[in-house]
Image (cartoon, grey):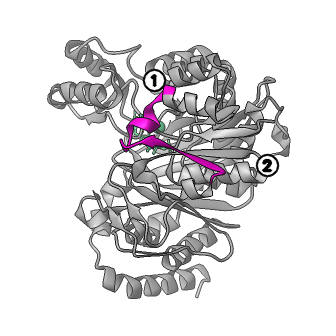
Amino acid sequence: MLQKILIANRGEIAVRIIRACAEMGVLAVAVHSEADRHALHVKKADEAHSLGEDPLAGYLNPHKLLNLALETGCDAIHPGYGFLSENAEFARICAARGIRFIGPAAEVIHRMGDKTEARAAMQAAGVPVVPGSEGNLAGLEEALALAEDIGYPVMLKATSGGGGRGIRRCDDADDLRRNYQRVVSEATKAFGSAEVFMEKCIVNPRHIEVQILADSHGNVIHLFERDCSIQRRNQKLIEIAPSPQLTEAQRDTVCALAVKAAKAVGYENAGTVEFLFDQDGNCYFMEMNTRVQVEHTITEAITGIDIVEEQIRIASGLPLRYRQEEIQRRGFAIQFRINAEDPRNDFLPSFGRITRYYAPGGPGVRTDTAIYTGYDIPPWYDSMIAKLIVWALSWEDAVSRGHRALEDMEISGIKTTKPYYQRILHTGEFRQARFDTGFVDAHPELLRYSEKRQKAHIAAALAAAIAAHAGL
Ligand code: ADP
Ligand code: ADP
Ligand code: MG
C-alpha cells in the first residue's frame, strides 16, 4: 500500500483526498499558494508546503510538485481534478522519477485528452460516437463543407477542451463563419492548442456518464451512471445518480459500453465515460475523463464505495475488491454545486468573506467543502465553493431532501447558486424527472427571484408538493 501521498490540488477535492488518506492510514502532504495559506486543506493535512506567492503557478508546475513529493518522502501524487489531473506530461515525469501518479498511464491520458483521438479509439472499439469530423478540422472551408453533410445545427469543439469551455453551437453557415475563429482562439487561449473538430449537435440531449473502476490486473467494472443534464453553458450544476430518466435496458447498454470503452484503451484507475442520449434514446460516446470527477460523490452515495480510496488501492497495485455482480445500488443521490456566483446577475462571481457558514445535516446529507466561517474566498480559483449531496430511497424523497438540506445550509456574506437550485427543485419537470441539457435556457423565469420572498415561497411550494405526492 502507498504510504505517503502529495495532493497536487486545493479546495474541497484536496480535503476529500485527505479524508480518504486518514481513513486508510496513509500520510497526506498538502501544497498551497500563499493565497491559500489559511485554506482548510492546509490545516487538515499531515504536512503542508508552500508553492510560493503566485496563486496559480505552483499548482500548475509539474517539476516543483514532483520535487516536493520526492523531498517529503512521498511515494505517490494525487492530482484531484482540474489543474494537472489530465496532464499526460505530468504523469510521465512522475513515472520517470519513481513517483506513482494516481490515475491512468500517461499514454492513456494523452489519448483520451485529445477528443478526436478518443473518438477514433471508440469507433475502432465499436462504441458509437456522435457523428462528426474525422479528426481535426483543417479550416473554415472544410468545416462549412462538413456541416452541409452532417446537417445543422453542429457543434464546434476544442479538441483539448474541458470544463465546458471551447464549445459552440452553430445553427447555420453564417453562424459557423462567425464562430469558427472564436472557437480556435478560445481553444488556443484556454488549452494551448488551436485544434478544433466538429460534431453534430444533438438537440436537447441528456448527459449520461458512467463511473468506471479498473485495476492493474485487467479487471474493469462500472459503478452505474450519473445524469448531469442540468447544465449552464455546458457546465454541470446539478448531478443525479442513477439517472431517473433511463430504462433498465438503457442503463445496461450504456454501462456495458463504458466498460467496453475502458477496456479498449487499457484504462487503469477511476475514470468516467461521458455519453449523450438523444430524444429517441440513442446514445453516443462524447468523451472520457481520466480522473476523479467533481460528482463522484453521488456514485459513492448509491453504491457505498469510496472511490478515492479505490483510486489509492488501485495505484498501490491491489486488485479490485469487488466483482461487477457484487456492486449494488440503492436509492437516488443528487449533488448541488454551490458556486460563489450571483444567478440573478448572469452568474457573476461573488468573492469575499464568508461571514457565516452552517453545514446542513440530518439523514442522507453530505457536504464536501473547504469553506468555514470567516474564510475569504480568493478570486483566482474555481467559483465552486461547496458540494451538497443528498440521498434517499426514492426519487421523490431525494428531491424533498434536497429542498430541506438546501434550506438547512447557510452561507452568508456572498451570493451563491443555492436559491436558484431551490427554484429548480420546485419545477414539475424536475420533480417528474423530465429534463435535458436545454432545461436552464428554457427556464429564464427561475432566475428572477427575491431572496426575502424565497423562504415563504419555498415553504408553500414544498407543502403543495408533499400534498400532491401523498395524493391529498
Ligand atoms: P467534471 O468533469 O468532474 O464533472 P468539470 O468539467 O466541471 O467537472 O471540471 C472540473 C474542474 O476541472 C473545473 O474546475 C474545470 O474548470 C477544470 N477542468 C476540466 N477540464 C479541464 C481542462 N482540460 N483544462 C483546464 N481545466 C479543466
Ligand atoms: P467538456 O470536456 O468541456 O466537459 P464535453 O465534450 O464533455 O466537454 O461537452 C460538455 C457539454 O457540452 C455536454 O455535457 C453537453 O451538454 C454539451 N455538448 C457537447 N457536445 C455536444 C453535442 N455534440 N451535441 C449537443 N450537446 C453537446
Ligand atoms: Mg465533459
For ligand 2, give the image quadrant: top left
**Eyeballing the image, is 391 above or below 312?**
below
Reply yes or no: does residue 172 show up in magenta.
Answer: no
Residue shown at 72% from the left, 48% from the top: 21
Residue 273 at least partly seen: yes
Ligand 2 closer than 8 Å to label 1 CB: yes
Give x and y (percent) for residue 164: 38, 40
Relative side of 455 to 263, left or right: left
Give x and y (percent) for residue 435: 46, 55
Type of the residue with mark 1:
Lys
Disc 1 target residue:
115
Reply yes or no: does residue 60 show up in magenta.
Answer: yes
Front: mark 1 or 2: 2
Marks 1 and 2 sit apart, C-alpha to C-alpha, by: 37 Å
Which region is colored magenta? 45-63
Disc 2 target residue:
25
Residue shown at 15% from the left, 29% from the top: 178
Could you say whether the residue bearing mark 2 is in a helix, strand or loop? loop
Relative side of 434 to 312, left or right: left
Residue 242 at least partly seen: no
Relative side of 403 to 17, left or right: left
Q: Identify the image quadrant of the N terminus.
A: top right
Neighbor class of circle 2 (other Cα within 10 Å; few <14, some 14-19, many 20+) is few
Q: Quadrant of residue 44?
A: bottom right
Give x and y (percent) for residue 30: 58, 46
Give x and y (percent) for residue 459: 46, 86
Type of the residue with mark 2:
Gly
Q: Quadrant of residue 216?
A: top right
- In front: 342, or 276? 342
- In front: 453, or 375? 375
